[in-house]
Amino acid sequence: MQEEQEVVSGVGWRMMKPDEGHQDSMVVGLAEAVERYGKKRALNSDDLMEGIEVQSSTASNVPPPRKKARGTLLPPLSTMNAAAPPSPLPSPHGSPPPEAAWPSAPPSGTSSPLPQAPFQPDLSLTTLLTLPSLLSHFNNLPPPLQSHFLLTLLRHSPLPVLRSLHSVLTPILARDFLTLLPPELVSHILSFLPFSTVARASRVSRSWRNIIDSDPVLWRDLLKSTKIWFGGESEAAFANSIYARRRHTLRDQPTVPRPLSLPHPYKMLFKSRHLTHTRWVNNPDPKHVSFPAHGSSVVTCLIFSHGRIISASDDHSIHVYSPITGELLRSLQGHDGGVWALAACKDTLVSGSTDRTVRIWDLSTGRCTHVFGGHTSTVRCLSIVKPEIVDVERNGVVTKERWPKRPLIVTGSRDHSLRVWTLPRPGDPEFKCFGPDENEVDLAEVCVSLFLESFQLIELL
């Protein structure tokens, strides 16, 4: 009699004693292992159905029967009710149940998929399926009951749900009162706000910016409340000049859609005067720049144009200075008498002198490009007239036309006359005409000679 084979064991594990019938064959083939596993699974599935727990703890110790036991018949359950409890049996309305027996060979990559457990609906899916009927019942309720129902749901909702509702309801319930109220009420409401608050309110949205910027009553009241309203004539003249400039710009340039409307001239005037007043009053260290101009000669006129100080003197010269440093940028020489009138348009300077001529200067180069002679006495004043849109009536029909067709120069002289000249464009050929026509007489000299003759007659008498 052979000795019993020693049981192999080690630290933490121990090999079970092999069965007596299989002592000679310790290796089992793959087909036999799969068949044994299938028989064992079939015996276990007869006693335990998937989804049902064993009630008795001793049932696991009972050996499985050799023959397949028939399952106990269960009462039929209705699968039409979505709220029914989960059932271990498949639904009669669904597909047939999968086969319980395993194949004799292991599944390959091209074989049919493994059987899946039947679908078991949960509470969230059941509630989702009943949502349409719930909405229909809610719509049929009167408004008081709808409010009561929603309040009940909110009382039982967690904090994350309430935060989500708040983020959705806040923009829906918000109302922009400035866009809903009439303009008169908007002006009245905004008139109680200081300028700093109005400026911040204009940055809330584009609609608020357009409403605030285009409100003439608001800015007129702000001008008066801050005591920088100088009278209706000066403010009206400023507004008319702004409107004329905008019409000129719209006529020369194509129409481009703007995200924001143009501000009212009163708003632009308030900004200019408010900044000037604030800089004068609140500047703790004002800067004073002083520089010599024409020496001992008298400064007859002075203008500020495009960041340049232009002064004229009776020493026959015109000087151009930097307003920041006081540096002399250019000295324009050419007049034979004192210069008494100046006007500028960009880089074009017009001057009038006691030499009876009107000169055109290019400030970028300092050259005199044109000389107009015609006055018989000192040119005391001049102005540049730019084209504007005016109403023209012809045969009872009023049309809007551009007048003058191009910029003009209007000069006034001591010879009691006004002369109109065409303002040369940059690049036009030079033109120089010195002195009046031969048949023109200086009326100022005639008046002086008549006065002297009268005085002599008085002495003789």
Image (cartoon, grey):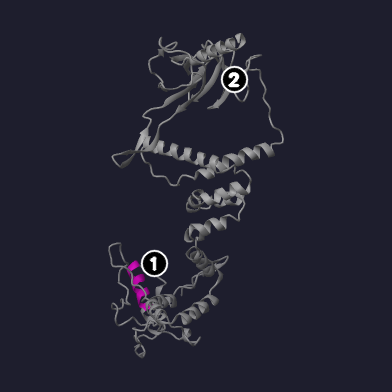
State the residue position of label 2: 300
Q: Is residue 355 at all visible to an observer of this figure? A: no
* Left or right of 380 in this view: 426: left
- Where is residue 427 drawn, in percent x and y? 39, 18
Q: Is residue 186 magenta?
A: no
- Where is residue 342 drawn, in percent x and y? 52, 22
Question: For the point 48% across and 73% down, which residue is it?
Answer: 17
Give the class, few, some or many, for how many residues have Cα within 10 Å of label 1's Cα (few <14, many ≥20): few
Question: For the point 60% across and 56% down, which residue is it?
Answer: 192
In depth, the one of 449 and 119 nearer the eye is: 449
Q: Which range of residues does the magenta coloring cover?
A: 30-41
- Where is residue 319 drawn, in percent x and y? 57, 17
Q: Nearer the viewer, mark 2 or mark 1?
A: 2
| Residue located farthest toward the right when viewing the structure as drawn | 284
Give the mark, 2 or 1, whose residue is nearer the N terminus. 1
State the residue position of label 1: 27
- Considering only vertical position in the picture, is 460 above or below 286? above
Query: What is the number of callouts on the image?
Result: 2
Q: Is residue 11 at all visible to an observer of this figure? A: yes
Magenta span: chief secondary structure: helix
| Amino acid type at mark 1 | Val
Considering the image in quadrants, where does the C terminus appear? top right
